[in-house]
Amino acid sequence: LAWYYEPIRAKKGTWSKVSYDPFAKKEIVSYGIPLYMNGQLIGAGGIDLDYELFRHNNQKEVLNKMLNNINQLTEFAKK
């Protein structure tokens, strides 16, 4: 449950360590963010990504843009 508790503790988005997902049968990395509404914590959200995506430099730019959008939504939810 690190994907849930780490972002809440850090009060920002966090990356997990690489782990093996037995259901997907592949290595994954997770990104989690705390979710706020009207300035109050309401939980955490996250996404699991195939770690293979991080082994290709061209995919990193796409992922960073996606995470930027997630962080912008989080900032909006804090208001």
Image: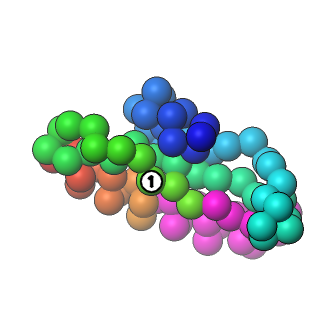
Q: Residue at x 18, y 38 (%)?
A: 39
Image height check: is 59 above or below 78?
A: below
Residue 15 in the figure: left or right of residue 19: left
Q: Give the image location of residue 73, x and y in percent.
A: 32, 59
Image height check: is 45 above or below 13?
A: below
Quarter assignment of residue 38: top left
Q: Specify the color scheme.
A: rainbow
Prevailing secondary structure class for the magenta stretch in the rendered image: helix
Q: Kindly identify which residue carries mark 1.
A: 45
SS for callout 1: strand
Q: Give the image location of residue 55, x and y in percent.
A: 85, 63
Q: Give the image location of residue 29, x and y in percent.
A: 72, 54
Q: Residue at x 47, y 29 (%)?
A: 10
Residue 15 in the figure: left or right of residue 41: right
Q: Which residues are magenta?
A: 48-68
What residue type is disc 1 on?
A: Gly
Q: Residue at x 20, y 37 (%)?
A: 40
Quarter assignment of residue 53: bottom right
Q: Residues within 10 Å of mark 1 (few under 14, many from 20)?
A: some
Res 34 visible: yes
Q: Residue 64 magenta-drawn?
A: yes
Q: Residue furthest top?
A: 9
Q: Give the image location of residue 67, x and y in percent.
A: 51, 59
Q: Residue furthest front?
A: 23
Residue 78 in the figure: left or right of residue 7: left
Residue 48 in the figure: left or right of residue 71: right
